[in-house]
Amino acid sequence: MIFSKSYCPHSTRVKELFSSLGVECNVLELDQVDDGAKIQEVLSEITNQKTVPNVFVNKVHVGGCDQTFQAYQSGLLQKLLQEDSAYDYDLIIVGGGSGGLSCAKEAAILGKKVMVLDFVVPSPQGTSWGLGGTCVNVGCIPKKLMHQAALLGQALCDSRKFGWEYDQQVKHNWETMTKAIQNHISSLNWGYRLSLREKAVAYVNSYGEFVEHHKVKATNKKGQETYYTAAQFVIATGERPRYLGIQGDKEYCITSDDLFSLPYCPGKTLVVGASYVALECAGFLAGFGLDVTVMVRSILLRGFDQEMAEKVGSYMEQHGVKFLRKFIPVMIQQLEKGSPGKLKVLAKSTEGTETIEGVYNTVLLAIGRDSCTRKIGLEKIGVKINEKSGKIPVNDVEQTSVPYVYAVGDILEDRPELTPVAIQSGKLLARRLFGASLVKIYHTLFWPLEWTVAGRENNTCYAKIICNKLDHDRVIGFHILGPNAGEVTQGFAAAMKCGLTKQLLDDTIGIHPTCGEVFMTLEITKSSGLDITQKGC
């Protein structure tokens, strides 16, 4: 389907391309139909493209002239033309974390056939986990539970000041805590699987990798391969902890992937890094009474307010956490095996030639995370990534450089991270893709009284509001085309800042006869397709 304009040379080029390929196209010349401007406005809202030609192939939005020729040169256009609707799935999501699961469930609610491919590649220490992604398994949830365990220890100390008396020696049992936490996480894993099953989402515990356009290979833990096709894909593979790239790091160090299910108490621990992950882990480990040192390359909590970051560091030092500033590890050696064993860490100064050594039971690396985008076959279908960071550039609707492939979560370039954002992004993406609009648009034409006697054009002036359906129909967009538009808009702007809703407009008595009163009687939504010409004064 080509939305075109008869006089547009770019539209002509695209039509000639499809003609040369022997492809029959439906062409709508927007300049030759009465509602062409409205159609183009709707297209702009759907595709975020304001120009023509606007090309769709087998329900996939290809784009304009340049994008269509790029797709032709890469072979993607030919692939799209060969495909009919007989894909295995409407949507396949690669990654079963917060964003992927949110998108999958919402798409299924909207009636689509959906599959989730999720496989956790074991860490260098052999740790893996179930469905749900980082937050549930090796992130926010176990971290907060361990933090709570540390707080309970502090509360025991404080309780004496509040009159609690006890003689028994109180100590912390790491194995009891991790078993309880892992049991809780297992219940969450099962809950996610059950939720997908209830919504008829196919869950496959296999590693997803693109092999050609619209096709992925799924490899399970036994190495068995299965192939699936889909009309559209969402990449939601998340990130994994980064390693130092020095001798002994992957052999002997652990990361947050391993800590929360570690079967033994880590003992004397060196935390390498100064991120919030590093400081959170150091904090609760010290809260258990462990000897904890944090090795800092430069500053604490880069990207955060540094006054606050230093106050956090000072508080941690007051509570027993030691800091080695301006040092980085250069080698890790195993002195003794065990649970835990003993490790020797050689580190050098970032400001000179000084070197230091230390012996620890456990070395925990928390120096950042890398996007899981380099080994899933994106290069085979032309999805572009930032070669330095591995993150995926997307447009305003989370679309990658390949029209039918989208992405959500921490793998996106220059977008907010973490679970709450991913959950909302996944849900909104599914709604955009499969038709559940988040907004309701009311509009009407009107004839200003000042124009009537003079015989000026009727039904030329236009009023429109856009309401957020998820926020009590709050007015988030206000448009008026007519006399005194600036004066009218200024008054409504203040009302919008105060949280104006459609109901408040309906409850307001209009000042008659004015242009502004038209907003008090808006009834027709754009989605209804009903006639909006003015019938009375």
Image (tube, rainbow, N blue to C red):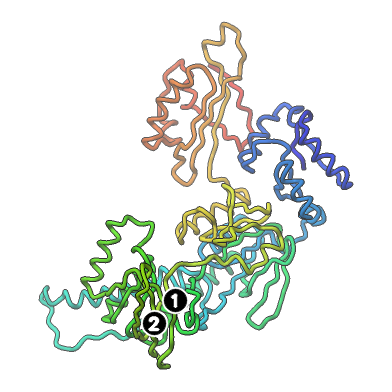
Question: Which sits in the foreground, 263 or 99?
Answer: 263
Within 10 Å of disc 1 (Cα), the crowding (few <14, some 14-19, many 20+) is: many
Q: Secondary structure at mark 1?
A: loop
Tag 2: amino acid: Val
Height in image: 512 above or below 169? above
Question: Dot 1 corresponds to which residue?
Answer: 255
N-terminal of the pair, mark 1 or mark 2, is 1
Image vertical order of residue 289 relative to residue 340, above or below: above
Q: Residue at x 45, y 25 (%)?
A: 489
438 above or below 501? below
- Position of residue 391 measured from the top left corner of the image (x, y, whole percent): 56, 59
Q: Residue furthest front?
A: 353
Do tag 1 and tag 2 residues touch (Cβ < 8 Å)? no
The x and y percentages for residue 74 are 76, 54
Q: Which residue is mark 2?
A: 345
Give left or right: position of 120 versus 4.
left
Front one among 287 and 300: 300
User: 535 or 132, which is in the foreground?
Assistant: 132
Let me know if residue 298 appears in the view: yes
Closer to the observer: label 1 or label 2?
2
The number of callouts visible is 2
Q: Quadrant of residue 319?
A: bottom left
> Which quadrant is the N terminus positioned in?
top right
**Eyeballing the image, is 224 above or below 510?**
below
Location of residue 108 by image quarter = bottom right
- Neighbor class of circle 2 (other Cα within 10 Å; few <14, some 14-19, many 20+) is many
Percent x, y of residue 472? 44, 43
Measuring from the top left, give residue 329's x and y in whole percent: 41, 76
* Amino acid on which disc 1 is placed: Thr
Q: Residue at x 76, y 48 (%)?
A: 57
Is disc 2 placed on a helix, strand or loop? strand
Say whether residue 248 is left or right of residue 271.
right
